[in-house]
Image (tube, rainbow, N blue to C red):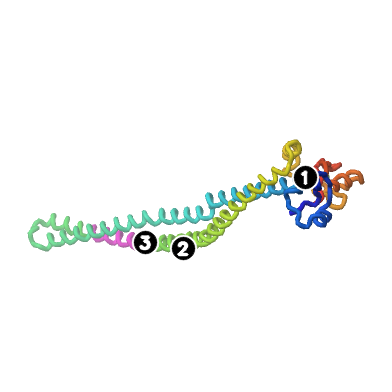
Amino acid sequence: MIPAQCIILIRGKCYVAPRHIVQRLLPDASEAILIMNQPEALYRLQEVELEIMRTQQRLKQIADTLANDETVQQAQNQVTAAQNQLNPLKSRLRELEHEIQTNESKTRTTEQQLYSGTVKNTKEMQDMQQEIEALKRWHGELETSLLETMMSTEEAETVLQQKEADLSAVLDTRGDEHRVLLQEQAELQAQLSAAKERRQQALKEVNPENLEIYVTMKPRKNYQPVAIMQGNTCSVCGVAQNVAIEREVRRGTQLVNCSNCQRILVTI
Ligand SMILES: [Zn+2]
């Protein structure tokens, strides 16, 4: 890639020339003899650094999303809540079934005793009869509770099934989303290491004192200390430059600042 403005060495002498002249002079120009002008070198450095920043920001977003998925968390919580509703009902159901069995066997035993003819005492027989009646009343109450608990259990089971289906649906879409994010993450990581290599190359084109100026300006200029001049206008702040500045920017032999925002101007 031949820069818009080049300093070219021809037979040991330096010339500043625009790209189309260089291309005509040196149709097979190798980059080795083209020294990139400093504003353009800084602009390329800035662009690759902005790309690195954007890539790193997106990578962080992806990492956060993957680590902390609220929708999955909520669906999971609802399943847990439904399980917490269902489990005590199931225990209650088992308890009631057991109580009913105990009640029935107690009733059977008492009836057997009563009708076996072994108990002759009337008072004792009356007591046993009363006990049987009480056990049967209690049996009726237990049956009612059992029925109610069975209905509640069925409802809770339906809710749990619904919540589990919801969670599984969320996980299915997340499966896709996560897959897409993981793919994007891999691509961005490859782009990032390529961009870091390009940054090393771009750094080689910048001389140390210009690099210092650029680095100092960077935080004050929102990481964008270099601005393209379009026509005679700074593309960042939109202010037109006077003829002298415009001419110097087009020559590209030194760093020229925008008369308004102070950014280094460059023509590409
Ligand atoms: Zn400006």
Q: Which mark is residue 261?
A: none
Query: Residue 149 magenta-drawn?
Result: yes
The residue under label 3 is which amino acid type? Answer: Glu
Residue 35 visible to an observer of this rendering: yes
Q: Earlier in the sequence, mark 1 or mark 3?
A: 3
Residue 48 x/y as whole percent: 69, 48
Q: Is residue 151 above or below residue 233?
A: below
| Residue at x 84%, y 43% (from the top left corner) | 258
Q: Is residue 118 above or below residue 225?
A: below
Dominant secondary-structure state across the stretch colored magenta: helix
Q: Which residues are magenta?
A: 133-153
The residue under label 2 is which amino acid type? Answer: Ala
Q: Nearer the viewer, mark 1 or mark 2?
A: 1
Residue 238 visible to an observer of this rendering: no
Q: Earlier in the sequence, mark 2 or mark 3?
A: 3
The residue under label 1 is which amino acid type? Answer: Val
Q: Which mark is residue 148?
A: 3
Tell me the quadrant of the picture where the N terminus can be found: bottom right
The residue that disc 1 covers is 226
Q: Nearer the viewer, mark 2 or mark 3?
A: 2
Q: Nearer the viewer, residue 229 or 235?
A: 229
Q: Quadrant of residue 208?
A: top right
